[in-house]
Amino acid sequence: MSRTIQTTLAFLIVLVSVTLVAQQPAKSAQKADAAAAAPRERLLMDFGWKFILGDPEAAQATAFDDSGWRKLDLPHDWSIEGPYSEDAPTGGQGGYLTTGIGWYRKQFTLPESERGKKVIIEFDGVYMNSEVWINGQHLGTWPYGYTSFYYDLTPYLKFGREPNVIAVRVDNSAQPNSRWYSGSGIYRHVWLTVTDPLHVAHWGTYVTTPSAATNSASVRILTRVQNERPQAQAVTLVSQVVDAEGQVAATTEAEKSIPAGGEFEFDESVEVATPRLWSPDAPNLYRVHSLVRSGGRVVDEYDTPFGIRDIQYDVSRGFLLNGAPVKMLGMCLHHDGGCVGAAVPAGVLERRLRLLKEMGCNAIRFSHNPMSPEMLDLCDRLGFLVMDEAFDEWTRRKPQIQHGYSDYFAEWYERDLLNLIHRDRNHPSVVMWSAGNEIGEQLAPSGHEVLGKLVEVFHREDPTRPVTAACDNVFTDTRELPAAFANLLDIVGYNYVDRWVTRRETYFADDRIRYPNRKMVGTGDSGLGGVRGRYDFAPVGTNDSARPPRYATSMIRAEQLWKFNKMHDYVIGYFTWTGIDYLGESRWPGKNSSSGALDTCGFPKDGYYFYQSQWTTKPMLHLFPHWNWKGREGQIVPVLCYTSCDVVELFLNGKSYGAKALDFPRQGSTGSWNRYARPQVFATTADLHLVWDVPYEPGTLKAVGYKDGKEVCTAEISTTGEPAAIGLSVDKNAMAADGRDIAHITVQILDDKGRVVPTADNEVAFEIQGAGKIIGVDNGNPSSHEDYKANHRKAFNGSCLAIVQGSRKPGKIRLVARAEGLKEASIEIEAQPGATFATLP
């Protein structure tokens, strides 16, 4: 049996899911105290499973014949494999995709040398109603599909050559049951952890930083050690705080005798001199390296990544990070990854987060359910503030679903909540818990009783972070959130604060006066959304032909909301719905929502650049719409610009259509009347965008942006020719040959001058050569019912996407793209030797 585990830093970088939350033992003998041979193994169990869609009888039995089942690797989501159907039980809530019941089986062997050790299996997520067996022994059932859970395999294992059989039944047949698309199956990683019977408990550490400053920080470390040996054990726990370079920054040591079958939670504190604090701008990470010693040797090692930072919430100043106010510029994200469904590789998550970071986003709300461990790892490493949300439903059924979490809440809420908190509470990115989203109990007379139970668990298990809930009925024209409910929340979350009557204009201001001690955050607010590249002119000659196209006005609500948030410090921040388009919440023929700043491919929409213009300081301007309007010659086309510049001048075919200016926040006099700290901008609008009404003629639009009187950036849009060629680009030229790493290949339809044709819809066929495979194709079109797993895809408004995953063999991967009548293109990716993983055949 092969059990090679890569321990280099490259491995830590290549596979996020194995790194931070995986809590692997440190191996640097020079820099940190470690045993010669690591006593703990954490083994990836993703490879070599068998699957069947259906419910065969007795499939949990060891001797069951699964020879005819499909072979696959995890993570796996069978729903995304389709087909779409208007009659699918999921309906628009689940994107009109199939669900049902499925089974997974895997065989693996364990050497005799591991007899007597503790072995657990951990599932990062199985949707939903999973049942797990080992060697025919039923281990348990876990209804909720979004939380991680684990089982002890130790009593039922076989050693030597005789195989063990793990069987998992997944029942996602009762529909609809989630808002929104859930996916079906073992859609996140599976791990096998092997330890000494004397070990740090699973999720058994809790690291906090009671004080954190640039000159010194205190680190408190709670470590729960379990003794499953038959005799009492004298235990020494060594806890080392290790920085990103592997240098030990502080060490503490404690001793305790732990009785047989017992456990003890060590409570230690250390001081770290001149720490590197964690923040979105500087996401510095440390780890606590725990060594459990007994009988003169190290019997367990355990790593807990964390960040040194101080968080506070002030009723007037908002969110304070390391003593400084930070406005949360947030996006809500659902858990699916477009064409890969719910089985989202870490590389897909990373690309999406990096795009949001480039937009200026610094905060993510996990809506409406817990995300994967690697998502938390990435938020730690890339620097995002996280609102970690537990549930979309408590005891009351939501109208869009028929079989939701309310069926299980009473029996399961505490177990699900404990697993969420214990798994995630060491992540520095997590700065706030959310108990639920738009919960039906908000206005119920006894709703506060349910909320009180959840808040009690949050505060007991993690007193360092506040608890909120995303409330959509804080105030309406007929009622408001009961005081008994609101007062239990550390922070009151407002969904669509501008939805109700006068709140359209006053936002949080009314409640600021009525409840001066209330802390407030926007948990779900309207964004710009829309379909990428679609501009909805009314047909010429119709009654609506004089109406401004929606793209010219759709940003007004988001602009006004941003202005209020920007200028009122007491508002902690806001989370726009949504950062990325997600599957579900649709009406046929649509299969996904189009509310994101990015589409399902991760391609930016126009609205993306609005947030970038307001949330970043780099010179930029974005011009839209495209300039292919054959048949509209001479008609007025509104040309819009999002920009961080003061002044922008627009030209069409060299003719100026004038300079326009914006200024927000406007500067006031300083020092004395009519004196200004910087040159005045004489704004032509109070909006946060610029617009010109331009009679259409083919050619080139050019915008020139100025800042403080100096030209700082330009943008051009040209009328293109007909499609002539395919253009390919890739987000990375090399990937790890680990069977997990992926690359995104963007496909664009070009004219004979190499310009993207913004209306092109050519079908592109893909051929993969070498040690790789296509795991998803997409184009961002919410009404497309093409197969996400096919080797072809129609372009949508000029573009589509292919996601390529490497195998565990090094070598070149070549993708060739072809379309009828177009010049083909190809691109190469090098799959390099990298991380290798445990295999359990």
Image: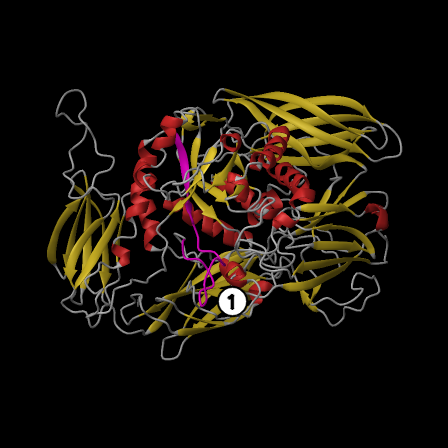
Q: Which residue is mark 1?
A: 788
Most frequent secondary structure within the magenta stretch: loop
Q: Is residue 230 above or below residue 153?
A: above
Q: What SS does tag 1 mark?
A: loop
Q: Amino acid under label 1?
A: Tyr
Q: Is residue 118 above or below residue 215?
A: below
Residue situated in front as seen by the camera: 663 or 537: 537
Q: Is residue 578 magenta?
A: yes
Residue 616 visible in the picture = no
Q: Which residues are magenta?
A: 570-595
Residue positioned 82% across, 30% down in the render: 262
Q: Quadrant of residue 823?
A: bottom left
Colour convention: secondary structure
The residue carrying pointer 1 sits among few (fewer than 14), some (14 to 19) or many (20 or more) residues within 10 Å by Cα, namely many
Residue positioned 21% across, 34% down in the render: 666
Q: Is residue 347 left or right of residue 684?
A: right
Q: Is residue 723 above or below residue 37?
A: below
Q: Is residue 400 left or right of residue 535?
A: right
The spot of residue 134 in percent (x, y) is 80, 54
The spot of residue 217 in percent (x, y) is 54, 22
